Amino acid sequence: MLRYTVLVFREPDGRYSVEVPTLDGCVTQGDSLEEAIAMAREAIAGYLESLAAHGEPIPREHEPPHVLTLELGEPTPPLKASTPSTR
């Protein structure tokens, strides 16, 4: 089963935009959250069908992306990178 993280944004006009980070350029929108999610499923399916038709590899999301909210204009401490410990 393929799974993809989607990012959903509420736009100023009340509509919803959806981006699929693993599938470069795969974006869509809907008037409601339900419609946006349905459109995202359709956009992902079409994207994958196009890749398959052109003999391109199907990207797989190995780990969900990290989603951060950054506030600008205030000094922030640098992020410390963490790595999995080896035992």
Image (cartoon, helix red, strand yellow):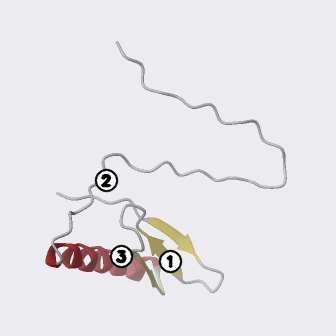
Q: Nearer the viewer, residue 38 or 77?
A: 77
First of labels 3, 1 by sequence position: 1
Q: CA distance from mark 2 to mark 3?
A: 16 Å
Q: CA distance from mark 1 to mark 2?
A: 20 Å
Q: Secondary structure at mark 3?
A: helix
Which dot, 1 or 2, sits closer to the camera? Answer: 2
Please name the residue shown 39% across and 74% down the image. 26
Percent position of residue 15, x then y? 54, 84
Q: Secondary structure at mark 1?
A: strand
Quadrant (top left, top right, bottom left, bottom right) of the N terminus: bottom left
Please name the residue shown 49% across and 48% down the image. 66
Instruction: Please name the amino acid that badge 2 sits on.
Output: Glu
Instruction: Please name the amino acid that badge 1 sits on.
Output: Ser
The residue at the far right in this view is: 74
Instruction: Please name the amino acid that badge 3 sits on.
Output: Ala
First of labels 2, 3 by sequence position: 3
Q: Is residue 66 left or right of residue 40?
A: right
Which dot, 2 or 3, sits closer to the camera? Answer: 2
Percent position of residue 52, x then y? 16, 73
Point out which mark residue 17 bears.
1
Contact (CB < 8 A) between labels 2 and 3? no
Please name the residue shown 53% across and 28% down the image. 82
